[in-house]
């Protein structure tokens, strides 16, 4: 009890120091904060809202119209064997692959709140139904940043495969999750199309507002840190914190596989967006973070392989400045080793749960 009280007091002191430091940084670096926030607003208006909002609305609409239940009755056997979850989640998993990072989490939350899936199913699906969408990867990363839509398609393919691999490994190492009884009537009363469309749009707008707000906060923090952190530390912060800024940075300075890692990892800002979209579903955040690292490594490794298979022009994958590549170890062997270590970590989960 004494230790717990001491930890609580220590946590309170840390939070107070953090707030005071943030207030001081905002005061002393107000111009940098303003510029970072403006960059975030531009990113939201030009990239995030156009690529995410329609899919978030569609994700909610599939639940409210009863489509998830309809498909779930036919796909239950397949999804149980591959991912260890019921077929009701099949449309949401698909939407997460074509919609973008928080779309899957939003759909999972909708199914959980409607009573169509169990808490355990929601937790399992939220660990692997995380993927950047084709609009972001093909239009922004490929066409805009690299001037080649095929590059975006390569990263997208690597991302989709990484999601499937992680889902399968979770099924193999952690087993099938607890589902509702097969005798339970899973039918969700569907809404009229007009009502479902309105509610889905409102739900997507609310979720989009949360996403953009988080992006603005992280963009403001990056603006402030730009004048504080040395160059390499600032670049590490950008790559780990916010994916839009990360791919913009890596596309100009690092090999393509580094961009692919940033996309697979998603960034802490995206992680917070997913936690918010899950709407109270309590997942293991440490496990979620480690799986995102695994996904980043797998996506990077597959992108590195696919770049030799699908694209002949290898110069686009070379580093702009050789000395910068040392920042990330620069060895594909290290990526393979890290992948093996992470899979060992997932394998250990099964033993921990016993």
Image: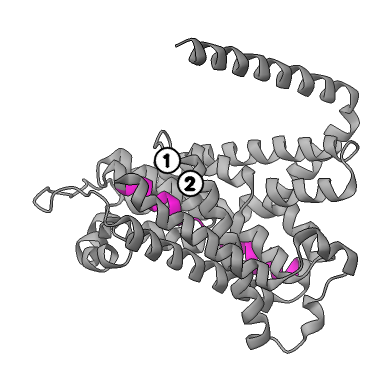
Q: Distance from label 1 to label 2 (Cα)?
A: 8 Å
Q: Magenta residues?
A: 121-144
**Type of secondary structure dominating the magenta stretch:** helix
Disc number lying in front (1 or 2)? 2
- Image vertical order of residue 22 relative to residue 202, above or below: above
Give the labeled residue for mark 2.
287
Residue 321 in sight: no
Give the labeled residue for mark 1.
283
215 inside magenta stretch: no
- Say which element carries label 1: loop
Instruction: Say if mark 1 contacts mark 2, CB within 8 Å.
Output: yes
Residue at point 73%, 17% (across, down): 17
Residue at point 70%, 35% (across, down): 217
In front: 213, or 338? 338
- Residue at the extreme left: 183
The N terminus sits in image quarter: top left
Binning the other alpha carbons within 10 Å of mark 1 as few (below 14), some (14 to 19) or many (20 upward) gives some
Could you tell me residue 253's position as x and y percent? Answer: 84, 64
Could you tell me residue 38's position as x and y percent? Answer: 80, 40
Q: Is residue 96 left or right of residue 250?
A: left
Could you tell me residue 205's position as x and y percent? Answer: 53, 41
133 inside magenta stretch: yes
Residue at point 72%, 22% (across, down): 18
Indicate the quadrant where residue 95 lies.
bottom left
């Amino acid at each position: 009890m004494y230790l717990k009280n001491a930890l609580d007091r220590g946590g309170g002191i840390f939070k107070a120091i953090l707030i005071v430091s943030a207030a001081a940084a905002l005061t002393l670096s107000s111009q940098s904060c303003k510029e970072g926030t403006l960059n975030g607003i531009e990113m939201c208006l030009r990239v995030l809202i156009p690529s995410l909002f329609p899919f978030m609305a569609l994700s909610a609409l599939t639940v409210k119209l009863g489509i998830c239940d309809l498909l779930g009755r036919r796909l239950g056997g397949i999804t149980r064997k591959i991912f260890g979850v019921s077929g009701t989640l099949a449309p949401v998993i698909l939407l997460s692959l074509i919609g973008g990072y928080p779309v899957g989490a939003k759909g999972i939350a909708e199914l959980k709140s409607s009573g169509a899936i169990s808490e355990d199913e929601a937790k399992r699906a939220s660990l692997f139904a995380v993927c950047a969408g084709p609009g972001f990867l093909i239009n922004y990363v490929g066409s805009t940043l690299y001037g080649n839509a095929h590059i975006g398609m390569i990263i997208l393919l690597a991302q989709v495969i990484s999601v499937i691999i992680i889902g399968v490994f979770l099924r193999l190492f952690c087993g099938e999750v607890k589902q509702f009884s097969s005798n339970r009537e899973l039918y969700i009363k569907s809404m009229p199309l007009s009502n479902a469309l309105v509610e889905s749009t409102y739900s997507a707008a609310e979720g989009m507002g949360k996403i953009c707000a988080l992006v603005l906060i992280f963009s403001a923090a990056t603006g402030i840190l730009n004048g504080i952190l040395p160059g390499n530390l600032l670049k590490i912060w950008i790559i780990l914190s916010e994916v839009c800024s990360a791919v913009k940075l890596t596309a100009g300075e690092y090999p393509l596989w580094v961009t692919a890692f940033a996309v697979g990892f998603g960034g802490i800002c995206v992680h917070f967006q997913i936690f918010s979209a899950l709407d109270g579903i309590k997942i293991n955040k440490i496990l979620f973070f480690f799986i995102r690292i695994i996904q980043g490594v797998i996506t990077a490794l597959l992108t590195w392989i696919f770049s030799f298979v699908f694209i002949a022009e290898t110069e686009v994958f070379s580093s702009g400045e050789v000395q910068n590549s040392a920042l990330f170890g620069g060895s594909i062997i290290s990526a393979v080793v890290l992948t093996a270590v992470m899979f060992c970590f997932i394998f250990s989960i099964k033993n921990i749960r016993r």
